[in-house]
Image (spheres, grey):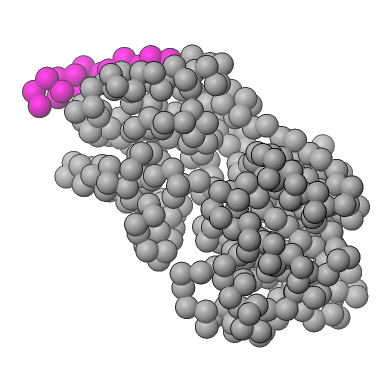
Amino acid sequence: MTFKELNIIEPILKAIEEKGYNMPTPIQEKAIPVALAGKDVLGCAQTGTGKTASFAIPIIQLLQNSKEDAKRKGIKALILTPTRELALQISECIDDYAKYTRVRHGVMFGGVKQGSQVNMLQRGIDILVATPGRLLDLMSQGYVHLDQVKYFVLDEADRMLDMGFIHDIKRIVPKLPKEKQTLFFSATMPAAIVSLTKTLLRTPVRIDITPESPTVEAIEQFVYYVEKAEKGHLLISLLQQAKNQSVLVFSRTKHSADRIVRVLTKAGIGSQAIHGNKSQAARQLALGNFKSGKTRVMVATDIAARGIDINELPLVINYDLPDVPETYVHRIGRTGRAGNTGKALTFCSREEVQLVNNIQRLTGKKLREAELSAKTVVRTLVS
Ligand code: AMP
């Protein structure tokens, strides 16, 4: 299957080609025709599956093809997403996919001054990507009107729920026209989400994509059994071996992330931490530096890293093991994306062995035990 066979229009095809996408991912293959046909979608899929393009491309195409929409002022598509990082990533994708169309879009999220977001609204946009809090805020100030919305996307609905946004969503939805197309995405479908889908969707087409197994299959997974105190040396030694590769290191706490950065800095390895204590600007800067290759190593906590989209990341290192085995799958899903292979290395101390067992039970795959190199062992002995 090609994008052309999905009946994507030429200006978008050209943009996709420039992005280097050769063929649609499974969710794109399933969701794009349904969305283009004007039907509601209930997508059970998570970040890393190509979900963003599966809703962004059809919306851009429907807007570009509609002469009536071209004349009409006002926001015609609303994409709600839980975090600023995700909002920015979606907006960047739309930047790329829509660059040869006349479709205009904008993004809004909290934690920054509202001035430029208000200006953007006043200039006029077709698609708005927003986090719920700031959207409600600007709605109540009279800057945002949703009465022209024809396409509504709710992204990462389960996270919205986890983050306590459900009431915000329930306040936003009544402001949307009754007659609209809704595309609803959630990685999991707990009861509260199922009941939300019932109020929001009209005879939706359900699309289930479970990336866990295929993603995990494409990733080489190793475990290093090391004592807690040895982890710093092991990390330095592995990063030195990995030379110029970009590496994402996961730590369980903000504290530990900062400590790892200090240890790496001492060893002359450039790294940055990304976690909830950092300001939005600092997180954006760290992410930008990492994406551009300016910083080779990024150390992240799970909360900060969830949903971060980094292309073709070759190596993920779990400095600490997560308490919940599903988090491990999320973490290593940063590598081996969209058909690429990747490597995931996990440091396991004596106290963490049970956590490795839980992961193996969940994924049905045994982590290969890596040999500690002589260099690392010697360093450990002398320290
Ligand atoms: P998402 O699930 O939307 O966060 O997408 C995950 C990653 O896959 C992003 O880096 C996209 O740029 C990339 N991607 C999306 N669709 C394709 C495709 N058809 N071919 C290759 N890469 C893709």
Question: Along the horizontal axis of the image, is 332 left or right of 247?
Answer: right
Q: Is residue 308 visible?
A: yes
Q: Give the residues in magenta.
A: 367-383
Quadrant where the C terminus sits is: top left
Q: Image quadrant of residue 211?
A: top right
In this view, 71 is above or below 344: below
- In this view, the residue in front, 11 or 269, is 269
Q: Is residue 8 magenta?
A: no
Residue 224 seen in this snapshot: no
Residue found farthest to the left? 382
In magenta segment, residue 377: yes
Image quarter for residue 76?
A: bottom right
Q: From what the image shows, is residue 66 above or below residue 192?
A: below
Judge from the rendering whether residue 201 lies leftward or rightward of residue 44; answer left or right: right
Question: Which residue sits at x=33%, y=43%?
Answer: 253
Going 70% across and 67% down the picture, which residue do you hit? 172
How many numbered discs sit on the rendered protein?
Answer: 0
Q: Looking at the image, which is closer to me, 136 or 167?
A: 167
Horizontally, is 124 left or right of 253 in the view? Answer: right
Q: Which of 240 and 264 is in front in this view?
A: 264
Q: Position of residue 225 (x, y in %)?
A: 30, 18
Using the image, determine if residue 232 lies above or below residue 349.
below
Rendered location of residue 279, percent (x, y): 37, 63
Q: Quadrant of the N terminus?
A: top right
Residue depicted at 90% across the width and 74% down the height: 67
Q: Residue at x 36, y 39 (%)?
A: 252
User: How far across and how far down the image is residue 144, in percent?
Assistant: 68, 79
Q: Where is residue 248 in the image (x, y as percent from the top left)?
A: 40, 41
